[in-house]
Image (tube, rainbow, N blue to C red):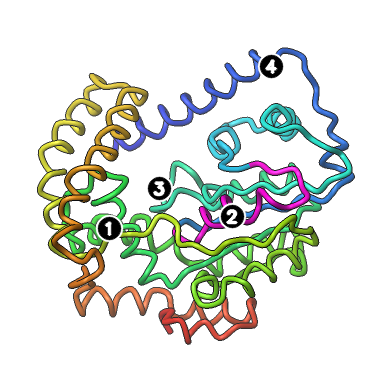
Amino acid sequence: MQRQTTDLTMAIENGVKKWSRLSNQLGDTVLSVQAFQYSPVYLHIGYHKTGSTFLQKRVFPFLDANYFKSLDATYLATSQSYDPHQFIELLGQACTIEEEKPTIISQETLSGRGDGDPIWNQFTIAERLYQTFPHAKILIVVRNQLEYILSLYTMRVVNRGLERLCLSDYLTQKFEARLRGKLQYDALVNRYTSLFGFTNVLVLPYEQLAVDSADFVSQVLGFFDVTQSHKFEHAKENVGIRNERIVQINRYINYPISVIIDFLRKYKIMSPRYYSQFANGYFLLKRLTLNAFLGKFMDPNDNVVDFSPEWKKEIIDAFKEGNHRLADVMDQDIAQYGYPW
């Protein structure tokens, strides 16, 4: 518990210091706040694992709008004393603002951390976004919780993490503590509709993007009321690997590395900056060597990792009632996509 408190405090302090340094570098340059007060603002808040990269690379850049991609939301999420005007001024330095155009901000961490880490509270972020952009429209994309968890877990093992636990042990550690709250979509959707108004929040299932990307994008553009400069090209982004043997080999490779890293970070021998540099290099090395080699001999999505019957039942039971409420808000049959029901 003491370690968790220390990690939380360090994360908050680092986030505030980072934004303070940036603010000092900007000097007294003032963004015309009218750019956000008198033109539409559209916020795409995620969730993770729901096609955000597709929207950010193939749709949003080609709209007639001011566009902020992959916004660093550390200050918004962790500062103890939040100032909406400071946040707006900092936004203005990240992109040239044309006051006649709408503004699109797309960042999946606006729905919190991918695994529900409480360092970033998704409800606090929602309230601060409302303080900053009270007339904004909100796009939320959700995903079948069973698929979300599998995608997150395999990504943390294979692509972007040092996870060494098997799926069942991972769930024992993370489900109650983080994922159950993170993936109660109806609770966060309800908070956004209560803040911004029901007609200003659009919730779409990720599965619709996979089935009919043209219709999915059409709904987004209609909600945003913006025009597209050219037809988008559909392509899958960040395709995951779920082959059980590939995942198991990556777990074994991750094990000694993660043990050493945990020790170095626990005793503050490795700073967050150097950890990030090391981790990014390690992830790239695995992708170019180990997983490229394994992919030549094993189908990445054959014999896939799956839940035990006990865990599958627990996950379904945890989310089925909330999904009924969510379906009513969305006015869609999400059960057809395999959502816990």
Residue 340, image x, y percentages = 41, 80
Q: Is residue 193 left or right of residue 31?
A: left
Residue at 74%, 69% (x, y): give it: 198
* Badge 4 or badge 2: first in the primary sequence: 4
Cα gap from disc 4 to disc 3, whole angstroms: 31 Å
Residue 6, image x, y percentages = 35, 30
- Which circle marks residue 117 in the picture? 3
Q: Is residue 61 magenta?
A: yes
Residue 3, image x, y percentages = 28, 33
Q: Which residue is mark 2?
A: 58
Q: Which residue is mark 4?
A: 26
For the residue labelled by badge 3, is the local secondary structure a helix, a strand or a loop?
A: loop
Magenta segment boundaries in residue numbering: 49-68
Cα gap from disc 4 to disc 2, whole angstroms: 31 Å
- Closer to the eye: label 4 or 3: 4
Nearest the viewer among 16 and 138 is: 138
For the residue labelled by badge 2, is the local secondary structure a helix, a strand or a loop?
A: helix
**For the residue marked with disc 3, what is the amino acid?**
Asp
Q: Quadrant of the C terminus?
A: bottom left
Give residue 287's quadrant in the image.
top left
Q: Which residue is mark 1?
A: 154
Q: Quadrant of the N terminus?
A: top left
Nearest the viewer among 249 and 152 is: 249
- Closer to the eye: label 2 or 3: 2
* Badge 4 or badge 1: first in the primary sequence: 4
